[in-house]
Image (cartoon, helix red, strand yellow):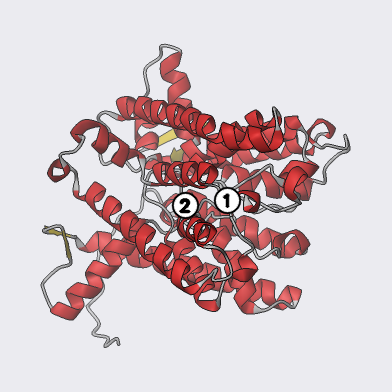
Amino acid sequence: MSGRFFGKQFTSFQIIISGFMIVILMGSMLLALPISSATGEWTPMSDSLFTAVSAVCVTGLVVRDTATYWSFFGQATIMLLIQIGGLGIVTITALITTASGRQISLLQRSTLQESISANQLGGVEKLTSLIWKVALVTELAGAVLLMPSFCAAFGLSGVWMSFFHSVSAFCNAGFDVMGGRTGQYSSITFFSDSFGVILPLCLLIMIGGIGFLTWDDIARNKYHLRSYSIQSKVILTVTALLFLVPTAVFFFNDFSNLDLKERFCVSLFQAVTPRTAGFNAVDLGQLTSAGRAMTVILMLIGGSPGSTAGGMKTTTAAVLFANAAAVAHRPKTPRLFNRRIDDDTVKCASTILVLYLFLGLAGAFVISIAEGLSFESCFFETASAIGTVGLSLSLTPGLSLGSRAVLVGLMFFGRVGGLTLLYAAADIGKVETARFPVGKINVG
C-alpha cells in the first residue's frame, strides 16, 4: 500500500521511517534548548540527537546521566519521546484521528497494519483502542505499585520517579532518573534486593514486550489457550523459556557474593531486562563471561512482534529453531504447534538473523578499532544498541562522535526493523518477470 505526498509516492514502510525521523528531529531540537538542561545551558546537538534517538528507539543508551543533566522539562520530553517511540508514531496518529471524529483512511490502515505487525486491515481501529487502554492502565498501575518504595526512599519526588520508570519499563526503554540520588548511571542498583521495585518493573517489561496482537488474543480468549493463534502460542512459550532458563543460569552461575534474597532478585531481573528494557540491578562488571554471553543472546532476541520491545523478536528465534529441527529430523517443512511454517517466513527469519549479526559485529569491529577497546566489550555495546536494550559496560559516554554515530544507526535500525528498511528501499514498481536457473550449493 502506498500514498502520494507532494507529488511523490511513498510506501507504508517509508511513511513509518519518515515518522520516526521527524519525531527524533523534533525531540533533539527540544532537548538542545536551555530549558531542557539542569544548568540552563544549550546542549550540544550531538548529545541531544543521541538522547532523542535513544528515547524514540526505546533503547536507553545515554551520553548524559538522565537524572543529573536534564531538567524536569528535559526529563518530561524524554518520557514523551519514549511513549511515542514505544507505542509507535502511526498508532498515536491513528488515535488522534479517531479521537477527532475522523475516519482512518485506507493508507493509514495499511501503515498501521505494518507498524503493529497486524495480520489484516480489518479491526485495526479496535486494536489501536486496545493498545492505548492496556498501555495507560498498565503504566498507571505500575506507577502505583512503585510509589511506596520510591516515596519511602526519596520523598515526594518518588511520585515523578514512579511514573517515569513505569513508562520507561512498559515501553522497554531503560531510561532511569536515579542518578541524582544513587550516583550517575546507577540505574536501579539501589533497589537490587527490593521485591517492591523488581517485580513491578519485571511485569511492566514483560507486558510491554509480548506484543499488541497477543494482548488482543488474551482479551478475546482469556484462559482458553487452545483458541490462541499460533503466533500468540509461540510468543508466550518462548517468553516463558527466556524467563525461566536465564534466571536459573544467572542464579547458579553469577552473583554468588550476594545473599539469597538479593541473588534471586538480581537473577530474575537480569533475565528479564536484557529483553530490550535496559535497566540493571547490579554492576554488569560482576557478570561472568558466560553471564555476558547470555545477556548478549537475550539482547539480540529481544521482545515480540508489534510490541514496545526491539530485537530480532521471539518469533524469529522460534522459526529458526523450528527450521533447524526440521533439517535435523528431515520432515518436509518446519512446524510449530502442529502448524507448517512457510518458506517465506523462514527466509525472513534467516535474513533478520544475518542482518543483526552482521551489523552488530561490524559496528563492534569499527568501534573497537576507532577507540582502542576490546572487541568483546564493544560487541556488548553494539548488541545493546541494535537490540534497543540500553545495557552498557559504561563505554558509551566516553565514545567519540564517530562511534556514537555507529550506535545511533544501530539503534534506529533496531527500532524500525531491518525488513522495514529493506522494503522501504525496494523498488515499488519492480515485478519479477524471470527466474534464474537453480544452482546446487552444499552447506554445512
Element carrying mark 1: loop
Who's the residue at 26% across and 32% down the image? 219
Taking the image as shown, residue 396 lies to the left or right of residue 170, namely right
The answer to which image quadrant residue 405 occupies is bottom right
Element carrying mark 2: loop
Crowding around mark 1 (Cα neighbors within 10 Å: few <14, some 14 to 19, many 20+) is many
Give the residue pinned by disc 1. 59
- Between residue 280 and residue 102, name the one nearer to us: 280
Asked if residue 273 can be seen in this view, the reply is yes
The answer to which image quadrant residue 442 occupies is bottom left
Name the spot of residue 363 as percent of width and height, x first: 60, 69
Give the residue pinned by disc 2. 310
Name the spot of residue 427 as percent of width and height, x first: 41, 53
Who's the residue at 25% across and 74% down the image? 324
Taking the image as shown, residue 252 lies to the left or right of residue 149, namely left
Measure how far apart labels 1 and 2 are at the Cα level. 8 Å
Q: Is residue 195 above or below residue 234?
A: above
